[in-house]
Image (cartoon, helix red, strand yellow):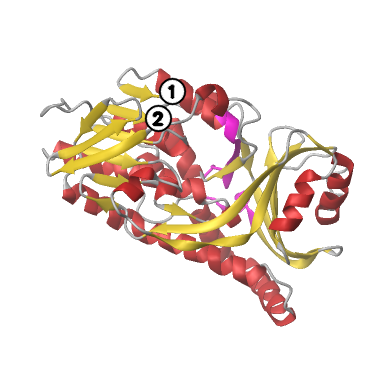
């Protein structure tokens, strides 16, 4: 698409994190010019110790990254998830005998795994390399947006250094504290959870067998997520005061506390890197669109990490928004036309809200030690486990394969 009316790009993205860079690549593939303004410094965000998280990537999301050219780099570091074990545990007693077991072998209509585990640092490096290889993506960093002006034809942003850029559409991919969202008056609803997620990577003596474990403990979920080699990523929710103490413990004491929840099925444990603490909260934007502005990723929704779906929701936003824009432009509309934005919001709003409220329900149901609830949920897990079609539906949904999928999530290119 050619720029006109004094536009500097077809689309301006405020925020160049994982969602922002993925969206930039998708729009570029569809033939649009993109300017990305990002406040972070690459030397910091690409450093190995910047982010201790690892992501459970739904296979539909992974298809999109492959279609956008990241497959060669990510395939080398991705750990397929072949099985998922969900169990109601209790400190000191280990997992319940009644559990929910997902096994990829049951999905006879596909050879794809249930998902893939990817360390955040590897994803950042792959996205950075892919964006640098696209000269039509103008990556401006470190830089922030200081002001936004809009008119019926487009949106203009003033950068912190005084420069101005203009495009038919401005996308807020600038996270939970989105400047774009606040500047255009989109309010949020939500609340803080009284817990912090402790995230770290461990080495262990025995193989994890490509199995992801999710234990529901009284204080919150405890996940053991397989990585390449004899390594796993731990996501461990604790009340904030307890989490702060655990983060400050020496390694030997921390491992001792970890083992109380972990057990000994993987043998000896040791920390591979630093521990990180992430306070948890729920946040939903009241709407995803405004005049010449749209939100995607955490600027539109931030959910409990219970099932590892937060980033996947943002990647679904990318696929849907890029397709809506590409389809609209092919009909002669400009990227910020209201019909394009309304189609995007209809496509994504229900899924985002449903997932957020679903995670809220499961957190409230499982993060307690009330005996009647404990008995009911344990029997519920066992009941779902006993019904093959129910198990297979949940596996397909968690893998991003259910519903009306955008082209990129089906592995199809947006290139004309």
- Asked if 191 appears above or below 176 in the picture, the reply is below
Give the percent coordinates (x, y) of residue 132.
41, 19
Residue in view at x 17 percent, y 49 percent: 338
Q: Is residue 64 magenta?
A: no
Give the percent coordinates (x, y) of residue 282.
51, 59
Point out the frontmost of discs 1 and 2.
Answer: 1
Q: Which residues are magenta?
A: 102-122
Nearest to N terminus: mark 1 or mark 2: 2
Position of 365 compared to 185: left or right?
right
Residue 268 visible at all: no
The residue at which mark 2 appears reads as: 68
Q: Could you tell me if the residues under marks 1 and 2 are in contact, i.e. CB atoms within 8 Å? A: yes
Residue in view at x 78 percent, y 49 percent: 246
Give the percent coordinates (x, y) of residue 2.
15, 25
Label 1 Cα neighbours within 10 Å, binned few <14 / some 14-19 / many ≥20? some
Label 2 Cα neighbours within 10 Å, binned few <14 / some 14-19 / many ≥20? many
The residue at which mark 1 appears reads as: 130
């Amino acid at each position: 698409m050619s720029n006109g009316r004094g536009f500097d790009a077809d689309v301006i993205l405020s925020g160049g994190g994982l969602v922002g860079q993925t969206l930039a690549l998708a729009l570029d593939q569809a033939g649009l010019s993109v300017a990305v303004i990002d406040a972070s410094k690459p030397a910091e965000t690409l450093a190995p110790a910047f982010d201790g998280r690892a992501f459970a990537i739904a296979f539909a999301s992974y298809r999109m990254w492959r279609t956008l050219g990241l497959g060669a780099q990510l395939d080398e570091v991705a750990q397929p998830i072949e099985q998922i074990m969900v169990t109601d545990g209790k400190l000191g007693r280990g997992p319940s005998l009644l559990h929910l077991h997902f096994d990829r072998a049951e999905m006879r209509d596909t050879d794809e795994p249930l998902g893939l585990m990817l360390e955040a640092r590897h994803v950042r490096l792959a996205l950075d390399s892919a964006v640098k290889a696209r000269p039509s993506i103008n990556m401006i960093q470190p830089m922030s947006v200081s002001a936004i002006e809009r008119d019926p034809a487009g949106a203009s942003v003033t950068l912190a250094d005084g420069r101005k850029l203009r495009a038919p559409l401005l996308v807020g991919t600038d996270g939970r504290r989105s400047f774009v969202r606040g500047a255009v008056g989109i309010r949020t609803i939500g609340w803080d959870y009284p817990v912090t997620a402790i995230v770290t990577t461990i080495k262990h003596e025995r193989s994890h067998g490509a199995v992801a474990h999710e234990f529901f403990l009284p204080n919150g979920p405890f996940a053991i997520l397989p990585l390449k080699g004899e390594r796993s990523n731990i996501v461990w929710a604790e009340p904030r005061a307890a989490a702060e103490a655990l983060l400050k413990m020496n390694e030997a004491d921390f491992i001792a506390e970890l083992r109380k929840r972990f057990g000994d099925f993987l043998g000896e444990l040791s920390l591979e890197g630093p521990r990180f603490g992430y306070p948890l909260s729920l946040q939903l934007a009241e709407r995803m669109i405004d005049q010449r502005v749209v939100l995607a990723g955490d600027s539109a929704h931030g959910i409990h990490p219970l099932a590892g779906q937060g980033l996947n929701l943002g990647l679904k936003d990318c696929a849907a928004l890029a397709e809506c824009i590409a389809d609209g432009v092919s009909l002669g509309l400009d990227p910020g036309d209201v019909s394009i934005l309304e189609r995007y919001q209809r496509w994504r709003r229900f899924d985002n809200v449903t997932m957020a409220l679903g995670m809220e329900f499961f957190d409230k149901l499982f993060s307690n030690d009330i005996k009647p609830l404990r008995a009911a949920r344990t029997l519920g897990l066992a009941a779902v486990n006993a019904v093959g079609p129910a198990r297979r539906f949940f596996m397909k949904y968690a893998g991003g394969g259910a519903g009306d999928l955008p082209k990129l999530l089906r592995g199809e290119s947006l290139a004309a």
